[in-house]
């Protein structure tokens, strides 16, 4: 693995041309074989997404090739022996299906339709989706990603839309609910929440009406990049690239201020500003803990000062028992991070560091490029929760009871290791 080319660092604000060059340069050094094969089936124009999708896959060290199916020819691409599904034999199939292209009546003219017509059209849509997934599963067990449907903002009933069960927005919401039921009947099929992605940046930034009318390309470049990143999150999870452990700094990360200088009573954490920023961030981390993500502390502090905060500060949401590893000392963070990975018996590439110190961030990036680093270097913490959530580094396509209790399992194993080192004989160890 170390002999393979790596994609290297990237900047979040790269322009499209810069991304295309990065992708092109990387592909020149990438072996032609052993690439993940991705097939995109679509009923609209989506060609520009290919570069973005490769970009995010390469960033996760997933070499890939991307093939686009024929325009508005989804079922034939699946069924025909010479079609792209049979020809490519993909590992991942992405189904991009847009209601506007399937039936403009459902997104433009519901107000003029009778209830029976609406029922017939929605049944036709759900039957088509079910048929597509069924035919895919006849030919491959590869992972399938299927878009849900975004709700258009321009609707005939205006402010009455929410009040009418058969309005266009409510019909699309119902179709999205039915999509959940449909996909649950097929193993390895996952819904990509396009409607939620649209809400992140807003309709005006997500939809490009000009290109839709001219070329049936509905999405802006900002939207295509966001959608590609979401696809890559699923692909990363399906390829076992999900991170396992979140390593956290303390001062100006878990709370505002420096505990060694401000004391426990003056650090910022609580229900009022600015402490509420850190309280919400801690709550999001606690939710990650409940998902089975391991938590660790790596902080340059006096250990007693930090532990006092966890034990005695009344507004702390996270407690010391939520952490499976704690490196609170004045050693360099690279050494501490290595020890965390060793203590937990996981790969160094399974760790994600969150830190506010530019020196520490750059030092870890230079010395441990396998560790993903999320910098919290903004002058305020308004976006801390969003940055961590939207990274998708810990996203998985499954969640089990074992995931829920993972931290307890690790702590139990650590206790056994301590006992083993302290006991004089194997009999003493078993008895303890």
Image (spheres, grey):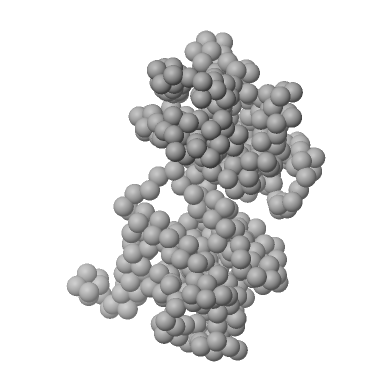
Is residue 176 something that shows in the picture? no
Residue 382 placement (x, y as % from top left): 61, 66
- Picture residue at 59% right of the left edge, 42% below the top: 198
User: Looking at the figure, which quarter contains the C terminus?
Assistant: bottom left
- Picture residue at 49% right of the left edge, 71% below the top: 279
Residue 131 placement (x, y as % from top left): 42, 18
- Picture residue at 44% right of the left edge, 78% below the top: 315
Q: Quadrant of residue 425?
A: bottom left
Of 26 and 224, the residue lying toward us? 224
Above or below residue 400? Residue 309 is below
Residue 416 placement (x, y as % from top left): 31, 69
Of 34 and 155, the residue lying toward us? 155
Left/right of residue 199 with respect to residue 224 in the rendered view = left
Of 204 and 327, the residue lying toward us? 204
Left/right of residue 231 with respect to residue 119 in the rendered view = right
Above or below residue 171? Residue 316 is below
- Picture residue at 33% right of the left edge, 71% below the top: 415
Is residue 68 something that shows in the picture? yes
Left/right of residue 294 with respect to residue 353 in the rendered view = left
Left/right of residue 142 with respect to residue 374 in the rendered view = left
Of 419 and 303, the residue lying toward us? 303
Count the numbered circles shown.
0
């Amino acid at each position: 693995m170390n002999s393979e080319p790596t994609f290297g660092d990237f900047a979040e604000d790269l322009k499209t041309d810069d991304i295309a060059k990065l992708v092109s340069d990387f592909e020149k050094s990438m072996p032609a074989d052993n690439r993940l094969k991705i097939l995109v089936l679509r009923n609209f124009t989506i060609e520009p997404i290919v570069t973005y999708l490769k970009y995010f896959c390469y960033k996760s060290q997933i070499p890939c090739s991307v093939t686009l199916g024929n325009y508005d020819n989804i079922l034939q691409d699946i069924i025909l022996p010479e079609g792209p599904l049979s020809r490519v034999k993909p590992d991942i199939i992405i189904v991009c299906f847009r209601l506007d292209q399937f039936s403009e009546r459902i997104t433009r003219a519901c107000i003029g339709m009778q209830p029976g017509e609406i029922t017939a059209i929605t049944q036709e849509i759900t039957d088509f989706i079910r048929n597509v997934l069924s035919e895919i599963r006849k030919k491959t067990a590869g992972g399938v990603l299927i878009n849900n449907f975004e709700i258009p903002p321009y609707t005939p009933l205006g402010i009455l839309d929410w009040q009418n069960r058969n309005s266009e927005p409510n019909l699309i919401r119902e179709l999205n609910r039915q999509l959940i039921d449909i996909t649950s009947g097929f193993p390895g099929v996952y819904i990509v929440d396009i409607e939620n992605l649209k809400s992140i940046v807003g309709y005006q930034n997500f939809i490009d009406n000009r290109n839709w009318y001219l070329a049936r390309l509905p999405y802006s470049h900002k939207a295509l990049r966001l959608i590609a990143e979401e696809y890559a999150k699923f692909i990363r999870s399906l390829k076992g690239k999900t991170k396992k452990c979140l390593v956290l700094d303390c001062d100006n990360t878990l709370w505002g201020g420096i505990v060694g200088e401000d004391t426990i009573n003056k650090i910022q954490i609580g229900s009022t500003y600015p402490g509420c920023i850190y309280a919400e961030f801690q709550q999001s981390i606690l939710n990650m803990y409940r998902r089975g993500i391991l938590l660790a502390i790596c902080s340059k502090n006096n250990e007693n000062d930090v532990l006092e905060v966890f034990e005695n500060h009344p507004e702390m949401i996270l407690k010391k028992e939520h952490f499976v590893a704690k490196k609170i000392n004045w050693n360099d963070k690279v050494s501490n991070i290595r020890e965390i990975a060793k203590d937990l018996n996981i790969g160094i590439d399974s760790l994600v560091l969150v830190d506010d110190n530019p020196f520490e961030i750059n030092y870890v990036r230079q010395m441990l490029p396998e560790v993903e680093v999320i910098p919290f270097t903004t002058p305020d913490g308004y976006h801390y929760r969003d940055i961590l959530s939207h990274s998708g580094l810990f996203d998985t396509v499954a969640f089990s009871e074992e995931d829920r209790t993972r931290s307890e399992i690790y702590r139990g194993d650590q206790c056994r290791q301590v006992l083993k080192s302290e006991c004089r004989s194997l009999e003493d160890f078993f008895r303890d």
